Amino acid sequence: MMLKNALPWLNTCANPGCQAKSLHKRFLSSGAYLGEARYCSPECFQIGLVECFAHLTQQPRSMPTRRQHRIPLGLELISRGCIHAQTLKLALQKQKEEPETRLGQILMRMEAVTEEQITAAIASQWSVPVFRLDPNQVPEAAHLVPFSLIQRYKMVPVHFSKQTNKLHLAFAQVLDRSILYAIEKMLGVRTEACIADESALQRVILNAGSQERPAEYVLNSLSRGELVSMIAGYALRLRAEKVFAANCNDQIWVRAVAKNEVTTHFLTSILPLHAAAVEADIY
């Protein structure tokens, strides 16, 4: 067992139809892992990608969900003694005139509450702690998650503990459990959510976008076949030893890790086979 772990070409290829079963042929390629499954050659790896993406695209798409049965923000603020019922009534009337504006924003504009009070109330709604985020400092852990996901879900990885293998992520308003699950699967960590002041979190996200980060490609209008071909090509070019893939609501997140631990992220939405040409943006 120790010898097989030390020499990856001794491990069995996960492709049932692999034609390179002989020990001699496995000397020629160290192969790559797709999740926990090892494939001995680029050809077998591409077959594994086809099966993996077929499985991911068949899974039901879960969109960001709000916590069920949580106390409305206005009532939460009243219970905390932050505002009076009459203030809430006035704010709700204003919200009817501005339906796109959140209640918390209206109350802050009325100078009825502070942002810290809103943050504490939202954290109570989600039953998670408050994290006091320094708006002028990007946490070291922020590079662990693709920047496009940080932007989309308005969240920032704020701390990673090697001792507990736990990654703490700060959200601003809506806490999406599905992205936490995807991060756990992709990084092999446990996650814990918290809520931070929205203004501080937005500032950190802005600063994080200007820092040097792992390569990241957002691929639009991509068919399943094109995605398989592109990821297989990149994995070969990068000499990736491990590749992971998971659903992120309506996207697929692919993470490729090379021998030197250099990580490359890919995010895409799978479209029908007649999809248009690929459009790629790089962060």
Image (cartoon, grey):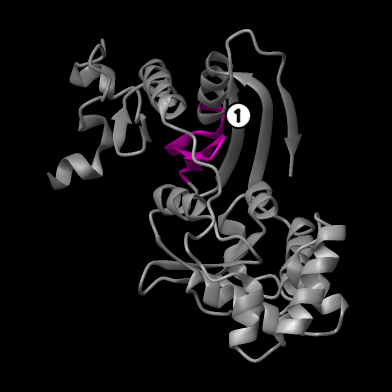
Residue type at mark 1?
Answer: Ser
Give coordinates of residue 24: x percent, y percent. Answer: 23, 18
Q: Give the range drawn in magenta.
A: 236-259
Q: Which residue is drawn at 43% across and 52% down?
A: 181
The answer to whether residue 199 shows anywhere in this view is no
* Left or right, 183 with reference to 205: left
- Confirm whether the magenta stretch covers residue 177: no
**Would you identify the image quadrant in which residue 16 lies?**
top left
Front-most of residues 133 and 29: 133
Residue 160, above or below 255:
below
Quarter of the rendering occupied by the C terminus: top right
- Confirm whether the magenta stretch covers residue 243: yes
Q: Which residue is drawn at 85% across and 67% down?
A: 94
Quarter of the rendering occupied by the N terminus: top left
Secondary structure beneath disc 1?
strand
* Left or right, 175 with reference to 25: right
Is the stretch drawn in magenta largely helix, strand or loop? strand
- The residue at which mark 1 appears reads as 269
**Would you identify the image quadrant in which residue 270 lies?**
top right
Residue 214, above or below 247:
below
